[in-house]
Image (cartoon, rainbow, N blue to C red):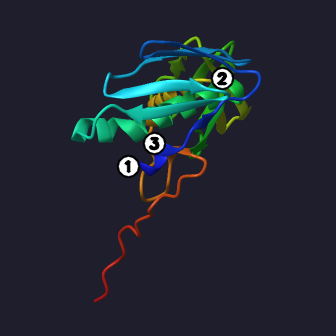
Amino acid sequence: MSRIGKKPVEIPAEVTVTLDGNTVTVKGPKGQLTRSFRDAVEIKHENDTLVVTRKDDQKESRALHGLSRSLLQNMVTGVSTGYSKTLDIVGVGYKVEARDENLLLSLGYSHPIYFMPPDNIKLQVNTPTQIVISGFDKEAVGLVAAKIRSLKKPEPYKGKGIKYSDETLRRKAGKTAGKK
């Protein structure tokens, strides 16, 4: 039995959950999320909790049990508190500017890069070298952060590029002069 799948998902007071077969809609102060789940798991609404059970003991059902519970927890947390990721820009001359809801990035290329986020994602520029990505969909926040990071991944010698603020980079020593 999945240890994660056994735990019930607590529903806060400001969040409403609607079940329609295996389609779950979660509404909260931050927004609304809808997701369809596979038939291998069954979702029940009991009191102020959601309980995920699997229909049989096959390998696919066991694999989807904990996953489905985690996805439900992410939906409930997202519409109640939201998610955010912070990116740091490291390098001489590398910077970011906020243009309306979009970003203008200078990353050492011969041209500036204009990044337009999806509708449910909010971008905030704290300093010219820091971006905060926030939204209520954990998957979308992570995807946008990964797309921005992929514009200039950090290199291992000087660490120049875009990195997550909590990311630790493995640095390389570089060349050393030979002794004679």
Q: Relative to the observer, which residue lies in front, 102 or 67? A: 67
Tell me the element at label 2: helix
Q: On the image, numbered disc 3 is attached to which residue?
A: 5
Label 2 vs label 3: CA separation?
21 Å
Q: Amino acid at mark 1?
A: Met
Q: Relative to the observer, which residue lies in front, 32 or 98? A: 32
Q: Quadrant of residue 131?
A: top right
Which of marks 3 and 2 precedes in the sequence? Answer: 3
Q: Is the C-beta separation of discs 2 and 3 under 8 Å?
A: no
Where residue 30 appears, x then y in whole percent? 70, 19
Categorize mark 2 by other alpha carbons within 10 Å: few (<14), some (14-19), many (20+): many
Which numbered dot is residue 1? 1
Residue sitting at x 47%, y 25%: 43
Q: Quadrant of residue 29?
A: top right
Where residue 49 appears, x then y in whole percent? 62, 31
Residue sitting at x 42%, y 34%: 53
Categorize mark 3 by other alpha carbons within 10 Å: few (<14), some (14-19), many (20+): many
Tell me the element at label 3: helix
Q: Is residue 84 visible?
A: yes
Where residue 106 appears, x then y in whole percent? 55, 30
Which numbered dot is residue 79? 2
In the depicted structure, whether residue 8 falls above or below residue 11:
below
